[in-house]
Amino acid sequence: MSPAAAEAAREPGVRILLVEDSETQALELRLFLEGQGFAVERCPTAEAALDHLNTSLPDLVVADFHLPGMKGDEFTRQLRLSLRTRALPLLMLTGARDGERQGLESGADAYVAKSADRDLLALRIRALLRERRTGAVEAPGVAAFRRGRVLVIDGSATFRTFLAGLLAQEGHAVSTARGPEEALAALDAASPPFDCVAVDLLGPSYDGLGLCRAIDQRRKAAEAAVAFHLVGIAGSTPSKEFLVDAFAAGADDVVSKEAGETLVLRVRGLVRRRLLEEDDRRIAGEFGERERALETARAEAEAAEARAALAGALARANRDLADANRKLTEAQAKLVQAAKMASLGELVAGIAHEINNPLAFILAHQGTVERLLGGLDGADAATAGKHVAKARDRVGAMRMGLTRIQDLVLNLRKFSRLDEGERSLVNVPEAIETVLALIQHKLGAGITVQTDFSGRPEINCTPALLNQVVMNILGNAADAMPEGGTIRVETRSTPETDVIRISDSGPGIPEDLREKIFEPFFTTKPVGAGTGLGLAIAYSVVQAHSGSLAVEAAPGGGASFVIGIPRQAGGP
């Protein structure tokens, strides 16, 4: 293997597109290049090669300069028009004496004479592959090149065929029409539209300027992105007046039929400009899509950051709210405990007063008994009998005082059991009577208590229901009647609910305040006379039983508090 072949073989998978119309030369070149380790595809014409490049990009193109139809220089210029193929390496082959100038001036990257040594061809290919740029990226399904589409309108079949042939040699896809009807039908049916329309302005069989105006109207109605160029063809050198009319009819250029090569060059220039404009729009569209994608990504990133920041803020707010709620709950618990201690202090003070009265009575009678018993020494029988009888009376009175103290202690022990937190069977009449006995000091002699225990004697509840709730309501009723009155306590039972109703004959509660009296710290008592937590605590205890606590007007005036406790499933 030659050094050139060895170098080429070190680049596996290199694909070369060979553009050569001669079957003999194409076969000879293909065998040589494949022997050097290259993969070769061959197209016989420049037009076929350009169509092939729309679907697949090779690593390098080797093209003959003298091709049928579109020549090698125009083929190269078409490659350089497209952003997708303009960086594709191209090596030009020609046998002409000025072939190097023809090849390089057209835009080829290198030139090799057909008669040159084949190893030289391999070396040039290697050099181009080594120096190639990687900017051209194949985009499957996106055509980088297309042939210019030209419509020729002329009443003369001879000239139509002649001009169509010249334009086809330039690589254009050419359609023809002999008059206005065929021309307008071709324009309407063209998909994609034409890039250039050449129309004979002096045809004897139709009004050329009128047809030019009709074509221009269709062009104006089309979108700017598909607007085509319009070339007018005159029979001879046109006059200034004719040029004015032609341009006014919408022509972009006017060329004489006698200047056939010039006509082809001008059509080539217009088509090339049209393709460049189309490529610019495509590039702008691609950049626009990238910009939009970038803006979308940036907006999504900013939105994600904003969501993350919002989530963090919400998390912090939730933590702050939970902390504030915890502190509020603790403060509320402390206030409730303070209210309970205040009630307990008031209860203890009342009980101490109740115990102090009989205790003072007992102590006074004790002194009397001791004196009477001490005077028995030396006394006659009659006097001793009187002293003993009087001492017996005083001892009986002392027993009554001790019994009173005993009852208070017993009730206090019962009350202490009512503060237990777990549910149990509670004897309702006994519990209510105990509470009434303990707050007797608050009821005094001016308040009469009436009871009617028609409901079930035992209910399943926490003892606090009858401790805290009933005592708070009875205490409020007593406070509402400083001049005395009547309190009525009733119990009723239904298949679903046990009801305790506590009514008083006091001034009652205005309707607009009934919704507020269960709110914490709300009180109608003077400042310093109440905490506003008694009924709030009672309401929370009833809610813990899934029950209800409501206030309404009593039948005879005053207020009536109704406690409803639902029956427990499986309970008595």
Image: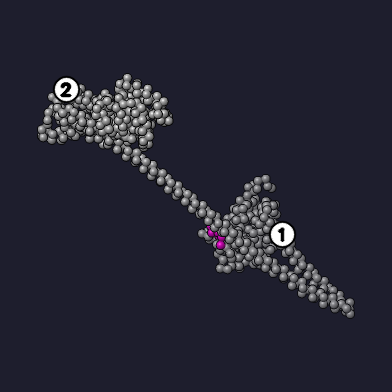
296 sits left or right of 564 in the view: left
Which of the two residues, 230 or 509, is positioned nearer the viewer here? 230
Where is residue 533 shown, x and y percent of the image?
A: 59, 61
Where is residue 506 shown, x and y percent of the image?
A: 59, 63
Q: Tell me which residue sits at (60%, 65%) in the image.
A: 479
In the current view of this chain or complex, which residue is farthest to the top? 24
Which of the two residues, 36 or 377, is positioned nearer the viewer here? 36
Quadrant assignment for the N terminus: top left
Q: Tell me which residue sits at (32%, 21%) in the image.
A: 25
100 sits left or right of 566 in the view: left
Q: Amino acid at mark 1?
A: Lys
423 sits left or right of 512 in the view: right
Q: Which residue in the structure is indicated by mark 1?
A: 414
Q: CA gap, disc 1 to disc 2? A: 129 Å
Q: Tell me which residue sits at (16%, 28%) in the image.
A: 259
**Badge 2: how crowded within 10 Å, few (<14), some, or many (20+)?**
some
- In the image, the segment drawn in magenta is 514-521
Above or below, 182 against 322 in this view is above
Q: Which residue in the structure is indicated by mark 2?
A: 156
Q: Quadrant of residue 570?
A: top right
Q: Tell me which residue sits at (37%, 25%) in the image.
A: 33
Secondary structure beneath label 2: loop
User: Do tag 1 and tag 2 residues touch (Cβ < 8 Å)?
Assistant: no
